[in-house]
Image (tube, rainbow, N blue to C red):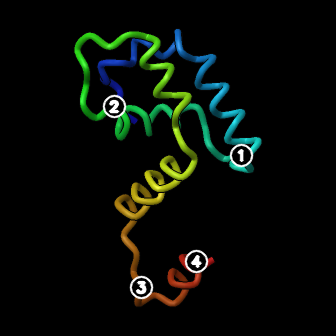
Amino acid sequence: MEKNHAYNHFRTQVEPALISKLEEFRLLGYKEVSNSGLWDYLTRKKWKKIKEEIRIYEIIDDILSVKVSDYISFTTIQTYKNHDFNLEDENEMKELLK
């Protein structure tokens, strides 16, 4: 998770929007998404380019517009980047294909 992102000072103010988005994910069956995971997605993907004069309503709009598919794609790619798969190992291959 990005610790020094420029928008981190908004986090407590936009907490209700984060909770609302997490509830939406849970209603759609994605119960494993966490508050910190969602914030990580936003800071590393959605807000990669920082706007100097961003307003709180823009932050909230970004949070509420997150699509499940975009979040899942991001976390899948991060998992592949952070894990070295050894496809020669039969046990790892079976685990990957689960």
Q: Residues within 10 Å of mark 3 (few under 14, many from 20)?
A: few
In contact (CB < 8 Å): disc 1 and disc 4 = no
The mark found on residue 48 in the picture is none
SS label for mark 2: loop
Mark 4–mark 2 distance (CA, rounded to whole Å):
33 Å
What is the three-letter code of the residue carrying label 2? Trp
Q: Nearer the viewer, residue 94 or 12?
A: 12
Quadrant for the N terminus in the image: top left
Mark 1–mark 2 distance (CA, rounded to whole Å):
24 Å
Q: Earlier in the sequence, mark 3 or mark 1?
A: 1
What is the three-letter code of the residue carrying label 1? Lys
Mark 4–mark 3 distance (CA, rounded to whole Å):
10 Å
SS label for mark 3: loop
Q: Return the x and y of residue 81 as percentages of the image width and height.
A: 35, 60
Q: Return the x and y of residue 84 as percentages of the image width and height.
A: 36, 70
Mark 3–mark 1 distance (CA, rounded to whole Å):
29 Å
In contact (CB < 8 Å): disc 1 and disc 2 = no
Question: Is 21 displayed left or right of 28 in the figure?
Answer: left
Q: Nearer the viewer, mark 4 or mark 2?
A: 2
Quadrant for the C terminus in the image: bottom right
Q: Residues within 10 Å of mark 1 (few under 14, many from 20)?
A: few
Q: Earlier in the sequence, mark 1 or mark 2?
A: 1
The mark found on residue 95 in the picture is 4
The mark found on residue 87 in the picture is 3
Q: Residue at x 54, y 52 (%)?
A: 69
Q: Return the x and y of residue 53 as percentages of the image width and height.
A: 26, 10
* Residue 86 lies in quadrant: bottom left
In contact (CB < 8 Å): disc 4 and disc 2 = no
The mark found on residue 47 in the picture is 2
Instruction: Please give the residue where the numbered disc 1 appears in the rendered image.
Output: 31
SS label for mark 1: loop
Q: Return the x and y of residue 22 as percentages of the image width and height.
A: 65, 34
